[in-house]
Image: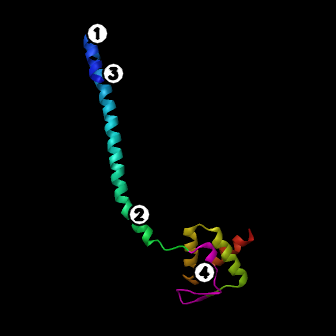
Amino acid sequence: MSTAQRLVQMILRGKPDQFNTIIKEYLNERASVMMEQVYLEESKNILEIIKPIQAQLELSKPESVPVTQFIPENSYQLRDGAVGILTETQQEAVGKLYKSLNTDNRQRLVKLLSESQESFNRVLNLAKIESKK
């Protein structure tokens, strides 16, 4: 039954004092519907703003090295001028560590291997610890 029909019935039954209750119920219901419509519209607007930004982030994301293609090298020319050298055992440990990581951490590991002597040593220590598990 519509709000108008309910109001007419209240008049016909002689209960005009219930008008306020019916009108409040109607306004609350209408406000809820309007809020939902505004929410949906704003959500669409936000998604439209986010899509180009997300596309730019995807384009600027460095390509990941597939698990099957990553083989640690025997030596790394580090950005700080030093040279990091890996033994065969260390190469295997770093390779196993790499395979156990998610994509983002794999990229970090590859980056850390050529960053500095300190980061190179941290990767080796972590690989050594992980290989013992």
State which mark lies toward you, 2 or 4.
2
Quickly name the residue at label 1: 13
Element at badge 1?
helix
Circle on res. 54: 2
What amino acid does circle 1 point to? Arg
Dominant secondary structure of the residues highlighted in magenta in the image: loop
Circle on res. 75: none
Mark 1 nearby-residue class (10 Å; few <14, some 14–19, many ≥20): few
| First in residue order: circle 2 vs circle 4 | 2
Mark 3 nearby-residue class (10 Å; few <14, some 14–19, many ≥20): few
Q: Looking at the image, which residue is at 28% across and 14% down?
A: 10
What amino acid does circle 4 point to? Phe
Circle on res. 120: 4
Circle on res. 1: 3
State which mark lies toward you, 4 or 1.
1
Marks 1/2 in contact by CB < 8 Å: the verdict is no
Residues shaded magenta: 65-83
Mark 2 nearby-residue class (10 Å; few <14, some 14–19, many ≥20): few
What amino acid does circle 3 point to? Met
| First in residue order: circle 4 vs circle 3 | 3
